[in-house]
Amino acid sequence: MKLRFLRFWYCRVPIETGVLLLVWFFVIQYRPTSGASMVPTLKDGAYVFVDRISYRFHEPARGDVVVIKSNEKPRMLYCKRIIGMPGETIEIREGQVYINEVPLREPYIIGNTFWEKLPGRIGPGHYYVIGDNRGMSIEEHWQGLVARRNIVGRAMGKGHEYVGMER
């Protein structure tokens, strides 16, 4: 009985703890969000699960809500939605997003926006990300091109209310 107890504490517990830590640091994380740029998809202060492994097997897709790391100091993590893919031309006219001059359907946006962005081509290995709360002024929003290497993972799970996107 005592040997079984010791084997449990000295073998099983460290192995299970090690596996849990590997999963936590390399596969999935639970992160808080802050700010209103993703409202109504993510409320200020909501927690999201970050899937850090799926983008090793496939590229991010338009409509994915992703967690990205900034190049600023100190490093910040942002939740944003991918709306532009590598090689595409993106433009925003009177609040409407155009991809290769075709209007993008965005059912997750509420309210009117009058954002403007001149047409620009997205380079290889980059994505155009933006928050869902377009009621905020464009100056208050962190948005724009992000390198693929700065995408930490896909926001997912029960930690937030997620409104999907039709592709």
Image (cartoon, rainbow, N blue to C red):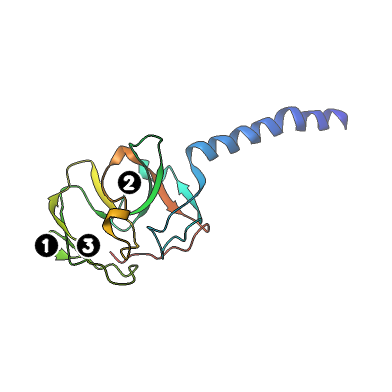
Which three-letter amino acid code belongs to the residue tagged 1? Glu
Q: Quadrant of residue 167?
A: bottom left
How many discs appear? 3
Residue tagged by mark 3? Answer: 115
What residue sits 17% from the left and 47% below the top?
A: 122
**N-term-proximal mark, 3 vs 2:** 2
Q: Is residue 49 left or right of residue 55?
A: right
Image x and y of residue 35, in percent: 43, 55
Which amino acid lies under the numbered mark 3 shown in the image of this protein? Answer: Trp
Residue 78 position, x and y percent, is 39, 47
Q: Is residue 39 above or below residue 30?
A: below
Measured in 3D between alpha carbons, the distance from the residue under mark 3 to the one under mark 1, in whole angstroms, is 16 Å
Q: Quadrant of the N terminus?
A: top right
Q: Secondary structure at mark 2?
A: loop
For mark 1, does the 10 Å Cα neighbourhood hold few (<14), some (14 to 19), or many (20 or more) residues? few
Say which residue label 2 marks.
Answer: 58
Give the answer, above or below, for where 126 lies relative to 74: below
**Residue at image mark 1:** 101
